[in-house]
Image (cartoon, rainbow, N blue to C red):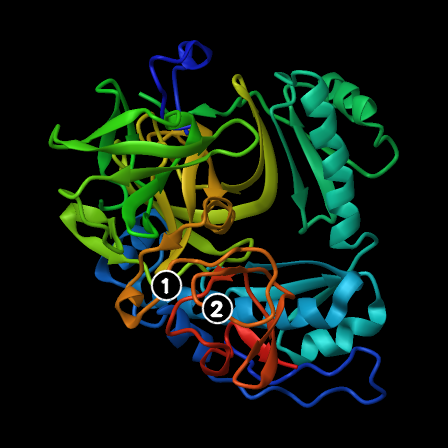
Amino acid sequence: MVGRHAARSRRAALTALGALVLTALPSAASAAPPPAPERQPVAARTLGAHKPTADVLRAMERDLKLTPRQATARLVNEAEAGTRAGMLRNTLGDRFAGAWVSGATSAELTVATTDAADAAAIEAQGAKAAVVEKNLSELRAVKEKLDAAAVRTQTPETPVWYVDVRTNRVVVQATSRSAASAFVEAAGVEGQGVGVRVSQDRPRVLEDLVGGDAYYINGQARCSIGFSVTKDDQQGFVTAGHCGDPGDTTTGFNEADQGTFEASTFPGKDMAWVGVNADWTATPDVRAQDGQTVRVAGSVEALVGASVCRSGSTTGWRCGTIERHDTSVSYPEGTVDGLTETTVCAEPGDSGGPFVAGTQAQGTTSGGSGDCTRGGTTFYQPVNPLLSDFGLTLTTTSASAGTPAPQDNAAADAWAAGRVYEVGATVSHAGLRYRCLQNHQAQGVWSPQDTPALWQRV
């Protein structure tokens, strides 16, 4: 994890981190193949992917070796792929086994299914079909048994395990095959196709109200601001849970009094939020290259394989790709579940900083291994569960359009701005029914009838 509270004995020994379809899908069981979809870059416009800032393009050129034109094409294609993946996920139901994008600029979408009969429907949406043995629910059930085993015993030799949709299996990263075998046996998942990746890397927390700026906890340890948020009339920011406990005080980069940790969860999850005083104002900005900023427009979750960039107070603005969601990491302080693994580098002090895909908030830096000289792996806490758990509203470029504080984040029938929605959720709006296509927190300007990139009429 990227950040440390010096007063906590359990953290005292840390030394490092922390294009395009908008038509409804027919059933896969239809007798005739569905017509080819009309292709329009609606999703890219909704998510702001068609007009990336110069800072995003420069970082993608440096870290992903893409020209500005290639980077723009990739961002547009990734945005459109997310909508198609959501439609297919809702159509396939229990047969859905994951989705990902690949290719330097094409962001070609692949959707996995357990039934070969679904191939025609998948290909009709401009995606590749992969027929696999296990659906996504089965993979997650195996991982949950590993999660439970990790709670019963420390797993220092098996620090990472995750659902890998591209290989249709759960993978354990271990320092040796014998350590992986012991963990798999303890979880009772022998013979269930669990893969093993041998690596000596052991992720750790990255120690030491614009996203990425430094702040200090109790005048000592340093972390990075994630995203600005509000709750009722209180402004603040989200960050990593391992950076501080409820009641800890913070100062800003200018040593001015800043705020107080209102809530913090770590381990289990790695999330916290800080309420700030009247001297600080929440903004939708994330610090980019050379003092420039990227403005956050929402929190639509990107697919595996998509490009993503990170800001932090130690190493600044860096980019890479999303390797996998639903990853568990066993840090020395305890296990954290539900993280996303990336190829973006990070170093001590970057903890809590923001990850963005284009203009969409993705999460806050938790931990990793390696550094920004030789490269490394970094994990982030997804932002939508953080917003939901703490009842926060993300500050975005559309906030002035009247987005209220979130209501109770439990299931509700009527669509409401500020609520966090997951793929498959159904709502009513203006007398019609809609099904969610991508995980996101609803913005005031993102009503279902106006955002076919996020909602499908049913």
Question: Which corner quadrant holds the N terminus?
Answer: top left
Hey, which quadrant is residue 130 in on the image?
Answer: bottom right
Which residue is under mark 2?
416
Give yes or no for contact between labels 2 and 1 (Cβ–Cβ under 8 Å): yes
Q: Residues within 10 Å of mark 1 (few under 14, many from 20)?
A: some
| Quarter occupied by residue 278 | top left
Q: CA distance from mark 2 to mark 1?
A: 9 Å
Instruction: Residue 195: name its quadrant.
Output: top right
Residue at the location (71% across, 48% down)? 167
Can residue 27 be seen here? The reply is yes
**Quadrant location of the C terminus?**
bottom right
Helix, strand or loop for disc 1: loop
Asked which secondary structure carries label 2, the reply is loop
Q: Amino acid at mark 2?
A: Ala
User: Along the line of sight, which residue is nearer the eye, 178 or 386?
Assistant: 386
Q: In this rendering, does residue 376 appear at all?
A: no
